[in-house]
Amino acid sequence: METRIIDGRKVAEQIKAEVTEELQELSKKNLVPGLAAVLVGDDPASQLYVRNKTRTCKELGMHSETIELPGETTTEELLQVIDRLNQADDIDAILVQLPLPDQIEEDRILLAVRPDKDVDGFHPLNVRNLVSGKVGLAPCTPMGIMYLLKSEGIALKGAEAVVVGRSDIVGKPMAFLLLHQHATITLCHSRTRDLPAVCRRADILVAAVGQPALITRDYLKEGVVIIDVGQNLVRTEEEGIRLFGKDSERISKIKKKGYTLVGDVHPRDPIGVAQAVTPVPFGVGPLTIAHLMKNTATACRLRRG
Ligand code: GUN
């Protein structure tokens, strides 16, 4: 079987083109959507994510604000920042970058964000809307994946969808979104008994467990569509050769940068077996940010439009 490699960057451009149209509509009402990103502490990965998010806002002509707070910030101090953003009329979307430092009570923070500005869909009210299939704000990565499945013409009605990984950010919301499109869902995880056999049921397999190259040939049914959400670092040449082969350009990447990325799916095993697969990098990654932009525009339209 010929396996199609899905370029997430192209799908992200489609999403951004739709956002641009939505922005033009909103500008007729003198509305410019605004996103506030809150970053606590100095985790380099989180800094990079937040920088990419605000850069994309600017690229599309949206308003954005980054609030950087020291690692010792208390729950009360962060609540005050949220309160200000909740009241700011030019801010439609509030994103608190996770994970937060240990001393901060994450639940109190996520509960404090106004539900209609909760661009990640983490507030209980938005979770409830997601579970019951109502329109609203839902987590950006699963929403981006749903967009990709639709734009690639993948049939979901009656299909067997297996989601590996039960996080609040990806696995659980992914399962509900697929369910609402009439897929039969199996939500499994690292402790599922005979995980390969469960995965072999899948017409659509979403891997979001954070285990490098866990999903190998043994997990795949011929013709499966694979969505790989994993972003794991490979730091040694030895592991690089095992995963990518000794002639891969990834080996020189490890030598040059000190690492390369691998998903939760083995990078070579799906080829010739799967119908389609998202690569790592440049698969699901670009969709998350693109859909954050879409959610920001949606939040603006729902609250002010
Ligand atoms: N950290 C990792 N992924 C996410 C996400 O989607 N949203 C937020 N706020 N933090 C994250």
Image (tube, rainbow, N blue to C red):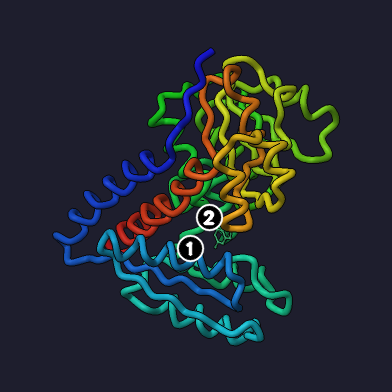
Q: From the top left corner, tell me how far across and down residue 285 is, in percent.
A: 50, 48
Q: Are marks 1 and 2 in contact (CB under 8 Å)?
A: yes
**Residue 20 at what x, y percent from top left?**
24, 52
Residue 249, compared with residue 75, is above or below; it is above
- Compared to residue 181, the image places residue 235 above or below, namely below
Counting labels gives 2
Which one is closest to the eye, mark 1 or mark 2? 1
Q: What kind of element bears circle 2?
A: helix
* Of 255 and 53, the residue lying toward us: 255
Quarter occupied by the C terminus: bottom left
Residue type, numbered disc 2: Asn
Would you identify the image quadrant in which residue 176 lies? top right
Residue occupying the point 22% across, 65% down: 31
- What residue sits 53% from the left and 29% below the top? 277
Residue 206, horizontal then vertical, whole percent: 61, 35
Quadrant placement of the N terminus: top right
Q: Give the residue at mark 1.
A: 118
Residue 192 lies in what quarter of the image? top right
| Residue name at image x 66 percent, y 86 percent | 72
| Residue 224 visible to an observer of this rendering | yes
Q: Residue furthest top?
A: 1
Disc 1 marks which amino acid?
A: Asp
